[in-house]
Image: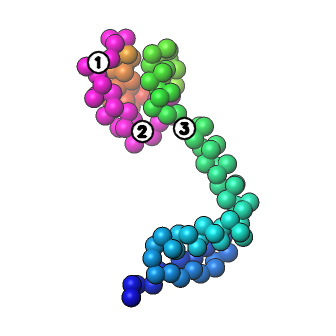
Amino acid sequence: MGKMIVARCSICGEVFRSRTRPASIRKIGEHWRKRHPESLSRRIKAGKRVAENNPSVQEFVTALQEAPRKAIRIYSKWTDYQYKTVKSFMDAFKPVLPPEIIASWELIEHFHDEGIR
């Protein structure tokens, strides 16, 4: 017999027990859909709002192509993790990018190195 997995609802505190992790996740999901549908939709809407305020890599690359000032505005909203992700992406594609985009990216790298937001 496997180890018993105990999970608890973060809203009402109801306890769920199961032998496997997938069964535990299924039980919690069913509970949320039955007992807390408004909380689930509220969390989904909150996540969508956060995503709208969080610029993606695609938006940044498009801004680099069209308007470097817009790319700088997007950069100012980023966290360090987002910058590192885009830096690895840009470093990989640097040899095939047009010179205008490379110049804009190097400007943003300079801003990052100098701590300018």
Q: Residue at x 47, y 29 (%)?
A: 58
Element type at mark 2: helix
Farthest left residue in view = 95
Q: Are marks 2 and 3 in contact (CB under 8 Å)?
A: yes
Q: Earlier in the sequence, mark 2 or mark 3?
A: 3
Q: Which residues are magenta?
A: 74-100
Q: Amino acid at mark 1?
A: Val
Provide the residue designation for mark 1.
96
Residue 68's tag is none
Element type at mark 1: helix
Q: Quadrant of residue 107?
A: top left
Residue 85, visible in the rendered structure: yes
Provide the residue designation for mark 2.
82
- Give the x, y percent position of residue 65: 45, 16
Provide the residue designation for mark 3.
54
Give how far apart the Cα atoms at labels 1 and 3 are. 27 Å
Q: Quadrant of the N terminus?
A: bottom left
Q: Is residue 24 left or right of residue 90?
A: right
Q: Earlier in the sequence, mark 1 or mark 3?
A: 3
Q: Is residue 17 left or right of residue 48?
A: left
Q: Main secondary structure of the magenta part?
A: helix
- Give the x, y percent position of residue 46: 65, 49
Q: Amino acid at mark 2?
A: Gln
Q: Amino acid at mark 3?
A: Asn
Decide which of 43, 68 is in the foreground and name it.
43
From this view, report whether residue 67 is shown above or below residue 2: above
Residue 76, visible in the rendered structure: no
From this view, report whether residue 109 is shown above or below residue 10: above
Neighbor class of circle 3 (other Cα within 10 Å; few <14, some 14-19, many 20+) is: some
Q: Is residue 98 magenta?
A: yes
Q: Earlier in the sequence, mark 1 or mark 2?
A: 2
**Nearer to us: label 1 or label 2:** 1
